Image (cartoon, rainbow, N blue to C red):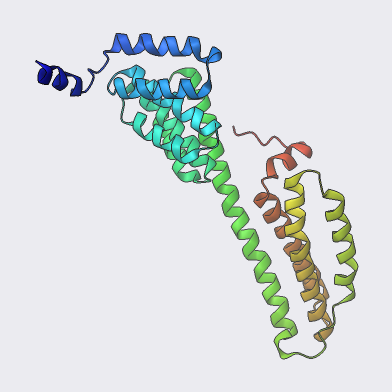
């Protein structure tokens, strides 16, 4: 008798049916504002384990994924969305959206676009509007990244051209040009004035200042050693600094802020 009782205790608990799982999920939603967050997370994990095939179990996984993402745990959030992704219906759509959001946060824009497109199939009007906006944003951010890569390539190409034109590897008079000495204190004052303020702007300035000084110095040395082609030098110097500005602003995540500041609508659609 004792052995039978012990064997019964060792059996795994029966999975909750849809109605029981839905009732427990509704109870958790009602109690969530009034109980400790860690307790709610533990209860949601138990529900997901006790109802592995019920829709409420899938929604518990979605909830856990959102909570993990809000808590700064992207890998844990993605693990929950991966489990919910195996469900069907709206749970699958919301899991695809969650996986898309995780991909967006990791700057995997093409992957995010694919998940948003998948989640759009059969989505409700409200969810479809959200997914369409996010998909278009993923496309736009991917395009911006390509433009930024081209901008950095242009900048590097102009610096290389100045170095080649001035034959700077041959030594000789390599004193810093006046132009470079002029901009150095200006850039230094801009950086000092930004300390303690917007970290994104400071990041862009710290990236821009030395790179801009480099291309200005290379241009000045090339012009000193091989005079001529002044208009070409000036045009390339302006192009390199504009490309550098775009690349730095993009890297610092300030492009949307800049576009809104100058009055350009940066929202997708």
Q: Is residue 144 above or below residue 166?
A: above
Q: Is residue 168 above or below residue 113?
A: below
Could you tell whether 148 is left or right of 123 in the image? right
At 80% from the left and 78% from the top, the residue drawn is 229
Q: Position of residue 206 (x, y in %)?
A: 75, 57
Quarter holding residue 237: bottom right
Which residue is nearer to you in this view: 165 or 178?
178
The C terminus, quarter of image: top right
**Which residue is at 52% across, 22% downward?**
37
The answer to whether residue 122 of the structure is visible from this angle is no
Q: Position of residue 4 (x, y in %)?
A: 10, 18
Q: Is residue 253 left or right of residue 4?
A: right
Quadrant in the picture for residue 208: bottom right
Quarter where residue 234 is shown: bottom right
Quick one: 74 or 225, which is closer to the camera? 74
Could you say which is closer to the camera, residue 268 or residue 76? 76
């Amino acid at each position: 008798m004792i052995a039978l009782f012990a064997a019964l205790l060792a059996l795994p608990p029966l999975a909750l049916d849809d109605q029981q799982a839905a009732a427990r999920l509704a109870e958790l939603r009602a109690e969530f504002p009034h109980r400790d967050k860690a307790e709610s997370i533990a209860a949601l994990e138990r529900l997901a384990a006790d109802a592995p095939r019920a829709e409420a179990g899938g929604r518990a996984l979605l909830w856990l994924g959102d909570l993990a993402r809000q808590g700064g745990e992207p890998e844990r959030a993605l693990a929950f969305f991966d489990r919910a992704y195996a469900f069907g219906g709206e749970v699958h759509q919301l899991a695809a959206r969650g996986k898309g959001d995780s991909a967006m946060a990791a700057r995997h824009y093409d992957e995010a676009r694919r998940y948003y497109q998948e989640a759009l199939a059969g989505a409700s009007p409200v969810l479809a509007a959200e997914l369409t906006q996010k998909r278009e944003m993923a496309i736009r951010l991917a395009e911006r990244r390509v433009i930024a890569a081209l901008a950095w390539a242009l900048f590097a190409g102009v610096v290389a051209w100045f170095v080649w034109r001035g034959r700077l590897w041959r030594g000789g008079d390599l004193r810093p040009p006046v132009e470079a000495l002029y901009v150095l204190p200006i850039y230094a004052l801009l950086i000092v004035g930004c300390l303690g303020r917007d970290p994104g702007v400071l990041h862009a300035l710290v990236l821009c200042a030395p790179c801009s000084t480099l291309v200005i110095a290379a241009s000045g040395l090339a012009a000193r050693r091989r005079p001529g082609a002044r208009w070409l030098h000036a045009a390339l110097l302006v192009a390199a600094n504009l490309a550098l500005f775009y690349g730095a602003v993009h890297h610092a995540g300030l492009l949307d802020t800049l576009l809104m500041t100058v009055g350009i609508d940066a929202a997708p659609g």
